[in-house]
Image (tube, rainbow, N blue to C red):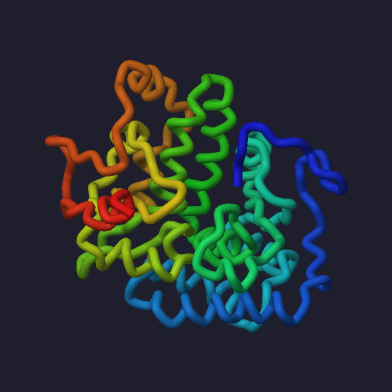
Amino acid sequence: MAHAELTLPDGAAADWTVPQDWAAYGPAEHAMWDRLFERQAAMLPGRVVPEFLQGLDILRMTRPGIPDFAELSDRLMKATGWQVVAVPGLVPDRVFFDHLANRRFVAGRFIRRPEQIDYLQEPDVFHDVFGHVPLLTDPAFADYMQAYGEGGLRADHMGAIDHLARLYWYTVEFGLMRRDDGFRLYGAGIVSSYGESLFALDDASPNRIGFDLKRLMRTEYRIDDYQQSYFVIDSFEDLLRKTSDADFGPVYRELEQSSDLAPDAVLPEDRIYHRGTQDYARAKLAC
C-alpha cells in the first residue's frame, strides 16, 4: 500500500485515512467480494497456514458481503490490539510505516471490477482485507507487522527503503511457511490470488528458498507476474526473532557493499527446498 511520491487526495485526513462508507457499497460490489471469497475459501484449506483460517473465524469474515472495517477493528482490537483503517489507495511510505507502527492496517475501500477478477495492479479491499487482515489475529505475526512499521520509519531516514520493501514483499505479500507435511501459503499476495495460490505450491517453475534476511533483502522481485522465487519461513515466531532488530543499521551498511540479485538467482549457500525450472518465466519472456 506504500508509495514514495503521492499527493494527499481531497477528502482525506492528514494521515491519509478516509471513511470506509460501508453503506455506499452496492449489490454488485458485495457480489464481487462473495465471488472472490468463495473461490479462495474453497481451495485454501490444506494449502494456507491454519492461522489464516483461524483468523477468518475470529473476525467472522465468512459472512457474505464486504466486511465493515469498524466491526473488524472491534474484533481485531480484542485479539491483538490492531485496527483496520480505510485509505483512498496507495499511501506514502512514511504514512504507511507510521500506521503499522501504531498497529493500524491501511486498506483500500474499492473493489475490483469483473474484468479484473484475476489481476489488478493496485490493491483493492479484497486483497487488503481478505489477504492481510486474518493473520493480524496471530500474536507473533501482529508483532512482526508492528516491528516492520517501526523499522520502516528508521529505514526512511537511512535511505534503505528499497531493501526493507523486499522484506515486506517476500514475507507479508509472498511468503511461504514450512510445515512437517509440506509448504503452506501465508503471503497476502498469494492467498488473495487464485492463480498464484496454485503456482506457489504446485508449479515446478519457481525457486523455494529458506529465509535468510540479508539474502532476501538483496533480491529483486516481480511486480507484474508470479514470483520467480519464494522464501520459506519455519514459523511466525521464528520470523519475528530473525527480524527483531528493527533498526537493521548494520545490515543496511553491509548491503551497500553487495550487488542486487535477480529474482531467479540461486546461490551456493542458499538453503534450497526446490530449485525451480523457471519454465514459466522463460515462456512469458518468449511471448
Q: Residue at x 47, y 27 (%)?
A: 247
Residue 82, located in which quarter of the rendered image? bottom right
Q: Say above or below: 280 vs 159.
A: below
Q: Position of residue 64 (x, y in %)?
A: 64, 83
Q: Is residue 272 left or right of residue 48?
A: left
Q: Residue furthest right?
A: 11
Q: Residue at x 59, y 30 (%)?
A: 153
Res 188 visible: yes
Q: Is residue 166 left or right of residue 213?
A: right
Q: Position of residue 8 (x, y in %)?
A: 79, 39
Q: Is residue 81 left or right of residue 141?
A: right
Q: Residue furthest front?
A: 287
Q: Say above or below: 214 vs 129.
A: above
Q: Position of residue 135 (x, y in %)?
A: 50, 61
Res 273 visible: no
Q: Residue at x 59, y 56 (%)?
A: 123
Query: Could you tell me how many numbered marks the image carries?
Result: 0
Quadrant of the frame with the C terminus:
bottom left
Q: Say above or below: 143 vs 220.
A: below
Residue 166, located in which quarter of the rendered image? top left
Q: Residue at x 59, y 63 (%)?
A: 79
Taking depth in this image into account, of 79 and 114 the one nearest to the observer is 114
Q: Position of residue 145 (x, y in %)?
A: 52, 47
Q: Residue furthest left?
A: 268
